Amino acid sequence: MNLSLGSKSVGTRFVAISLSAAVFLFASTASAQEAGATPLFGNDVLDLLIESRNQKPASQATAEERAAAIDELTNIYLVSNLPRAVELGQSPQIKAQLDLQEKAIIFNAFATDYIAKNQATDQEVFNTYQEQIALAPPKEFKARHILVDTQAEALALIEQLQGGADFVELAKEHSTGPSASSGGDLGWFTAQAMVKPFSDAVGTMEDGAFTAAPVQTQFGWHVILREDSRDSAPPPLESVSDVIKQRIAQQKFQDFIQNLRSNVSE
């Protein structure tokens, strides 16, 4: 019996399969699981499902993972060939969904192929690396902070600092953060290491200054003292080259798409 998906004989022949015959077909399928073959689908479809479900090559799947995939595909293929399922497949909505999925799969395959064939050259990677270094030399900050629950508490602390109070002692006494015991010391850090409101505030301050207004984050209200700042050494090219290559390849594809869209609109 030919039950290949897409064959015109599937719909007509499957109509005649009774419930008992369907049960028999499940049993026949189970007997073929050791070889990984079934009367309904080929190993290429099986491997695709295994890899998508388990995120690893099909050749590395366990016997249990392979059996589960066969069971799932058997159900899918049996139901999809039922007369009512075939009828539903003819509806405009289902056809549109299938068409969209097909186009998306083809798009992803094309994108993967294009990127693989348009990898960044060593010179492109080096030039991008140099541009990034020149554009924004990395900077590090050394700071302390006092974390409190309310804006009013933070304002009162700033008033004490303006009156000459010692920041370290205030942090030890009032901060609710884990750095309280060390006087609010956060050590050296980059802006990317802190939440944005905090890093934005530190970035606009002068060395030796504390915040004139409390800074709110999801953790509470901060009074910040920026003790020092320095330019940090950029990461070596070897440590970031893979990331740069990926970004360049993706940008090449985006440029290709944009050029394609421009040609269509002309």
Image (cartoon, grey):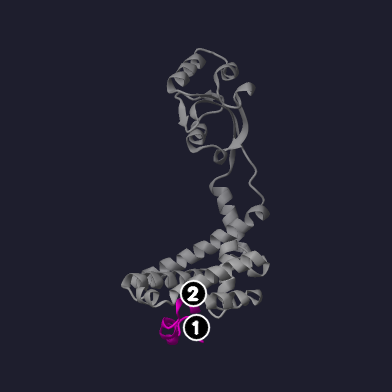
Image position, residue 200 (x, y; %):
48, 35
Q: Residue at x 63, y 33 (%)?
A: 188
Count of numbered circles on the image = 2
Describe the element under mark 2 as helix, strand or loop. helix
Q: Residue at x 55, y 18 (%)?
A: 174
Magenta span contains residue 114: no
State whether residue 28 appears in this view. yes
Q: Earlier in the sequence, mark 2 or mark 1?
A: 1
State whether residue 127 appears in this view. no
Residue 124 quadrant: bottom right
Q: Is residue 9 above or below residue 86?
A: below
Describe the element under mark 1 as helix, strand or loop. loop
Residue 91 quadrant: bottom left
Q: Amino acid at mark 1?
A: Leu
Name the residue carrying label 1. Answer: 3
Image position, residue 63 (x, y; %):
66, 67
Q: Which residues are magenta?
A: 1-21
Name the residue carrying label 2. Answer: 77
Q: Nearer the viewer, residue 110 or 162?
A: 110
Q: Residue at x 48, y 71 (%)?
A: 76
Q: Nearer the viewer, residue 164 or 37?
A: 37
Q: Amino acid at mark 2?
A: Tyr
Q: Residue furthest front?
A: 20
- Distance of mark 2 from mark 1, alpha carbons? 9 Å
Image position, residue 53 (x, y; %):
56, 63
How many other residues sit within 10 Å of disc 2, few (<14), some (14-19) or many (≥20)? some
Magenta span contains residue 7: yes
Residue 204 lies left or right of residue 183; in this view the side is left
